[in-house]
Amino acid sequence: MRKIVNSTYISLDGDTERLDQWSFEHWSEDLEQYANRLLSDADALLMGRETYVNFAEAWSKRAGADAFADRMNAIPKYVVSDTLDSGDWGETTVIARDRAAEEIARLKERPGGNVLMYGFGPVAQTLLTHGLLDEVHFWVHPVIAGGGTLAANGFRHRLRHTGTTAMDTGVVVLTYAPTEPTATE
């Protein structure tokens, strides 16, 4: 069975959305190698509509720039959305939000590599709730961005720490596996 692996950049105060304002200054060869490993272990991407729209615009402009950009553009994509009818970024499959858990469970059962997911929004929360998310890699950046968003809607779920990778720029990637929800979650 395939694993679904989430990779999310986060500031110390929980900002996961305004990456362009604080994450680039921490990029290094270390981070690039880690990102390349996650992407090379995957043969599909999974994302919500906002991430998909932002990534499609950014990565399609970088076609031919390097192997990472070319892989991002070439890999099959699955996007959970109630507003998109189709995707125009390479091989894209749109999954209706009300069928997301069922369709993603089927995707996990197919043979292949990992399914890589960027960002931690409603889709990641749905996967955790249904026991479909296997790993979460939080790339904690040493910056207070001034607008934490990770738990703005009150979502809670316990995770078990499974690994830590410290990068040369001060970024720490914390890897977690989901635990069973408790009665208060």
Image: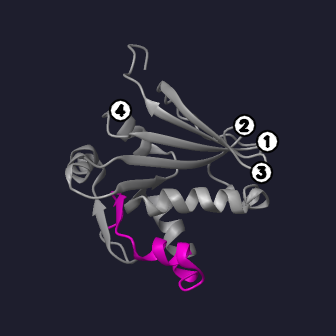
Residue 40 point in image, percent of width and height: 46, 63
**Magenta region includes residue 98:** no
The structure's colour scheme is one colour
Residue hosting label 2: 13
Q: Amino acid at mark 2?
A: Asp
Residue 23, by quadrant, is bottom right
Q: Secondary structure at mark 4?
A: helix
Q: Amino acid at mark 3?
A: Asp
Residue hosting label 4: 129
Dot 2: few (<14), some (14–19), or many (≥20) neighbours within 10 Å? some
Residue hosting label 3: 168
Of the residues tagged 3 and 2, which is closer to the observer? Answer: 3
Does the CB distance between marks 1 and 3 fall below 8 Å?
no
Q: Secondary structure at mark 3?
A: loop
- Residue 75, numbered circle: none
Q: Please, which residue is most extreme toward the top here?
A: 183
Q: CA distance from mark 3 to mark 2?
A: 21 Å
- For the residue pair 162 and 20, the one nearer the viewer reads as 162
- For the residue pair 44 and 58, the one nearer the viewer reads as 44
- For the residue pair 156 and 41, the one nearer the viewer reads as 41
Q: Amino acid at mark 4?
A: Thr
Q: Secondary structure at mark 2?
A: loop
Quadrant of the frame with the C terminus? top left
Residue hosting label 1: 144
Residue 18 point in image, percent of width and height: 67, 55
For the point 35% across and 32% down, the residue is 129
Does the CB distance between marks 3 and 2 fall below 8 Å?
no
Does the CB distance between marks 2 and 1 fall below 8 Å?
yes
Residue 175 point in image, percent of width and height: 54, 38
Q: Which residues are magenta?
A: 59-84
Of the residues tagged 1 and 3, which is closer to the observer? Answer: 3
For the point 48% across and 67% down, the residue is 53
